[in-house]
Image (cartoon, coloured by chain):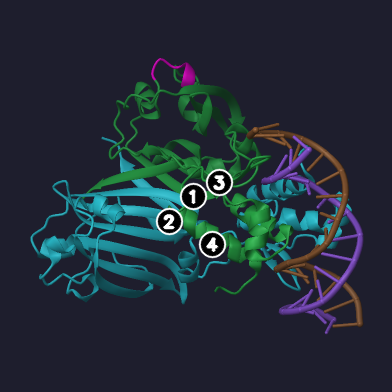
Chain colours: A cyan, B green, C brown, D purple
DNA sequence: TAGTGGTCTAGACCACAAT
DNA sequence: TTGTGGTCTAGACCACTAC
């Protein structure tokens, strides 16, 4: 068999069986006592192996019941081939939001092509489906563009959607860029997304809208990583 | 302060500092002994906290030296806005590959719109930069399409790239779809990508090429999740 | 009440790095 | 030699679940 420490061998055994579907979601793992006997190690080694799997988000411990394989039923984020100016109907989600004037942090300033400290409108969103949070987002718009207009506050405008709102003030969005990365969730994200304390990683999409190569809005979209699949479609020319 | 168990409080403290950049890459964490005293807990609790951070891929333990914050220098995978038929020059990477006739597994068959067990050409790739593996991929093509042609074996053809090879046998690729997910690495992937035993998660892109809505090739692209950023660009119409 | 996992302690031995 | 992290043991107490 494999060498390496016992706890890794145990974790490796289960990880591959979980990932290849041999052990489907909601399956109960053998009890810690049984694993001690099966592998001939002490309880703490078994727990260490299970802790690894928990931290990877593959299993969930339920006190008094057992350790269960985490069920994965991925939501799909369809990325539009073309970002149209008439956005498609939204899925049945609730939305919480709040807008505040703010000064651009350096990272945001760079994305918006403005100076750090320049005034921006920051809007924070949280999307829920069936009462469960499924996405959070933070958007920044330079007040140099929207300040004083009818669409200054994104969610209190007559029209919604970045392209449509910009269009309403004569700014024609012609390009959108997305940068997607994957990382562990911060404590704030765990709280807002109701993620467990272990095995929580998120997918972060940094999205920027441009009008003639000038950024007019940038946004951090944060998704629970284990719950989503991201689809992109391209046309070959 | 936060409540919850000590090991989580410790892990939470460091996680947020690492993610917001307060603690940059290659920083050495305080020694376990020092953390014991700082938090007033036993060594095993400190180790548990560090184990959580290791499993999340945020820190790396170096025996005899200390625990260090993992450095992140992300490679960028630029996704072409339009998949052109003359692919852009490849980055300076080496490539290993092997092609074999195979029978389609059910999951692959479904992606290719063929029956399970139908003959396919399976090609496995591994890409290396500066000797380090940075990506692995597995491609499947129905032999019903390429069998007996000059491009049957992808890497031994005069032209490379799916669109160009298909073009050479009169199949005109007009659409490409990608589905991106994030998950822990399997043992096989850890081996092929030289990933450490802990904190290893990958980004999987399932990509399919279509010609008139008929799948002509499908491919699993596997990237080390912590090392990559994925960019997508869209034109607003 | 019995079985389960969750947290924590005290201590041992090992491998490796720096000096 | 000293300090570091890596692995493992034996055992305690708690919280929760099921019966």
- Residue denoted by label 1: B181
Secondary structure at badge 3 equals loop
- Residue denoted by label 3: B28
Label 4 crowding class (10 Å Cα cut-off): few <14, some 14-19, many 20+? few
Residue A87 appearing in the image = no
Residue segment shown in magenta = B154-159
User: What is the CA distance from the residue labelled 2 to the residue labelled 1?
Assistant: 24 Å
Secondary structure at badge 1 equals strand
- Placement of the N terminus of chain A among the 4 image quadrants: top right
Secondary structure at badge 2 equals loop
Are tags 2 and 1 found on a single chain? yes
- Residue denoted by label 2: B20
Looking at the image, residue A228 sits to the left or right of residue A61; the answer is left
Image vertical order of residue B215 relative to residue B30, above or below: above
User: What is the CA distance from the residue labelled 4 to the residue labelled 3?
Assistant: 15 Å
Contact? badges 1 and 3 (CB < 8 Å): no
Image vertical order of residue C5 relative to residue B224, above or below: below
- Residue denoted by label 4: B13
């Amino acid at each position: 068999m494999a060498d390496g420490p016992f706890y890794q061998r145990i974790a490796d055994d289960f990880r591959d069986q979980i990932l290849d579907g041999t052990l489907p979601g909601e399956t109960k793992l053998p009890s810690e006592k049984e694993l001690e006997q099966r592998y001939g190690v002490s309880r703490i080694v078994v727990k260490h192996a299970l802790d690894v799997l928990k931290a990877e988000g593959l299993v969930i411990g339920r006190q008094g019941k057992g350790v269960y394989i985490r069920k994965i039923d991925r939501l799909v984020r369809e990325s539009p081939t073309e970002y149209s100016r008439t956005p498609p109907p939204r899925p049945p989600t609730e939305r919480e939001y709040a807008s505040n004037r703010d000064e651009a942090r350096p990272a945001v300033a760079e994305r918006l092509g403005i100076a750090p400290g320049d005034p921006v409108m920051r809007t924070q969103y949280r999307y829920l489906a069936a009462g469960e949070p499924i996405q959070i987002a933070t958007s920044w718009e330079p007040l140099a563009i929207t300040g004083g207009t009818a669409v200054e506050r994104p969610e209190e405008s007559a029209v919604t959607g970045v392209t449509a709102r910009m269009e309403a003030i004569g700014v024609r969005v012609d390009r959108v860029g997305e940068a997607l990365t994957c990382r562990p969730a911060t404590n704030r994200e765990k709280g807002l997304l109701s993620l467990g304390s272990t095995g929580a990683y998120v997918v972060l999409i940094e999205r920027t809208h441009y009008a003639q190569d000038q950024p007019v809005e940038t946004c951090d979209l944060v998704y629970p990583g284990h719950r989503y699949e991201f689809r992109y479609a391209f046309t070959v020319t």
